[in-house]
Amino acid sequence: MIQQSNVIRVLIADDNAIVRQGLAALLEQEPDLTVVAKASNGQEALTMFRQYQPDVTLMEVRMSQMDGVEAIAALCTEFEAARIVAFTVICLIAVGKCNQEISSALHISQSTVKFHVNNILSKMGANDRTQAAIFALKRGIVSL
């Protein structure tokens, strides 16, 4: 049995209720993960983050009200140690999109895409995008 202090506390932020529930169900199957909160938009994610102080946040980039990019910027400004995985970016990496295509699809700058890609690679311990995509597919984070 894993001690409670070793459990990774996760916040899920996605505007699609089915995605939120599905991710929560997948994550809860892991003994060292627990979903502490779910948010349907960026503003809600900020509120939930402040309240629950999760170890990791899974953030959809495209959401209503405050999108994930704005929420990530606000969280990183307020909480320097915030660890956030931009979910849409890893999904687009997994289907082979380049930075320019991701930038166009998400209406964000290529430098923002590079920032997210580098964070994803670092958090996954991956050496390159292909390794990150394989990791995400094998772990059920994304599906094709």
Image (cartoon, rainbow, N blue to C red):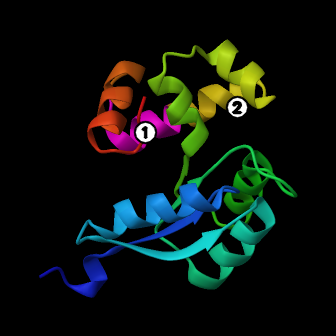
Residue that sits furthest to the front in the current view = 18
The numbered mark, 2 or 1, whose residue comes first in the sequence reads 2
Tag 1: residue type?
A: Val
Could you tell me which residue is drawn at 51 percent across and 39 percent down? 119
The residue that disc 2 covers is 112
Q: Is residue 96 left or right of residue 124?
A: right
Q: Nearer the viewer, residue 129 or 30?
A: 30
Q: Nearer the viewer, residue 44 or 109?
A: 44
Q: Quadrant of the C terminus?
A: top left
Where disc 1 sits, the SS reads loop
Tell me which segment is drawn in magenta. Answer: 118-126
Could you tell me which residue is drawn at 62 percent across and 17 percent down? 99
Q: Is residue 81 visible?
A: no
Could you tell me which residue is drawn at 48 percent across and 21 percent down? 95
Tag 2: residue type?
A: Thr
Q: Quadrant of residue 16?
A: bottom right
Q: Is residue 74 visible?
A: yes
Q: Nearer the viewer, mark 2 or mark 1?
A: 1
The residue that disc 1 covers is 142
Contact between labelled residues 1 and 2, with CB atoms less than 8 Å apart: no
Q: Is residue 50 left or right of residue 30?
A: right
Q: Is residue 123 magenta?
A: yes
Q: Quadrant of residue 44?
A: bottom right
